[in-house]
Amino acid sequence: MSKAEPGLRKSGKRKQEDLSPVTVAAGSIDVAYERIYAAIIDHSLPPGARLVENRLCEIFGLGRTRVRQVLQKLASERLVTLLPNRGAIVAAPTVQDALDIFEARRLLEPGIVQRFVERATRADIQRIRDHLQKEKVAAKRNDRRSAIRLSGDFHLIIAECAGNATLLELLRELVSRSSLIIALYQEAGSVCCPPDEHQELVTALEKRKADAAQLMLHHLEHVLADLRLEEPPAPGVDLLAVLGGAVN
């Protein structure tokens, strides 16, 4: 594939962009994917928001075929739902989805934490410490977008340092879908992952404590318990206001 016609990158560590105007290469599938992905994860595009193909073509300077490639990629990650004859919407997880996803995380993440305890290097521990400080700064600034992103990244960093690529990829999808669930069902004023609970986890990881896995389990149970699991109405959203910017 030529440089003039970039394709979608494989799933990996994604740069989280804000949605202020930026200069990007016209017709870039990667840019469209990253912009939409970031807007979904930080909740600028809420669950149920319509992703109208014509508007996306205008915003990103892409043809319909390329826009559909982007939407299909997001759909494969369960972040977008493709509806026959109706187009695409940001995925709106049901109450049962929420229960299933957090059950999967409760089954998966304690094992990841145990693997981290057994294998992590000093550099890994320092990386977790440094990340926690970023979470605390976002919390003090009441920066909800950054707090949501950093909270999810905390769990992914532990998985990355645990050294199993398959577990990391499984958790990446679960964390992304959890972010949608939190956007949809979190009580007003609540914090998706309280920094003090992450601090407790970091302390246990530093000391290689045997109960670190149990702390992760309790943490995930607390996050789920903090959600108000009732089906919400679908929102409206202005795609240009959220995704627009200088696309040159």
Image (cartoon, helix red, strand yellow):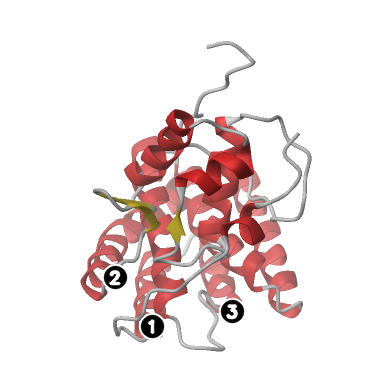
Task: State the CA–CA distance, disc 3 to disc 2.
Answer: 24 Å
Instruction: Tell me the kind of residue under disc 1.
Output: Leu
Q: Which element type, helix, strand or loop, lies under badge 2?
A: helix
Disc 3 target residue = 196
Q: Are marks 3 and 2 in contact (CB under 8 Å)?
A: no
Q: Which residue type carries mark 2? A: Ala
Q: Report whether 154 appears left or right of 51.
A: right
Give neighbour class at mark 1: few <14, some 14-19, many 20+ (Cα, 10 Å): some
- Residue on which the image places disc 1: 227
Q: Secondary structure at mark 3?
A: helix
The residue at 77%/45% (across/down) is 22
Quadrant (top left, top right, bottom left, bottom right) of the C terminus:
top right
User: Quick one: SS at disc 1?
Assistant: loop
- In this figure, which residue is indicated by the disc labeled 2? 98
Indicate left or right for 240 with 158 as reference. Answer: right
Looking at the image, is mark 3 or mark 2 earlier in the sequence? 2
Which amino acid type is marked by label 3? Answer: Asp
> Eyeballing the image, is 203 above or below 89?
below
Q: Position of residue 176 (x, y in %)?
A: 43, 56
Residue 219 in sight in this render: no
The reply to whether dot 1 and dot 2 touch (C-beta < 8 Å) is yes
Q: Give the foreground label among 3 and 2.
A: 2
Q: What's the residue at 74%, 79% (across, down)?
A: 140
How many numbered tags mark residues here?
3
Left or right position of 98 against 235:
left
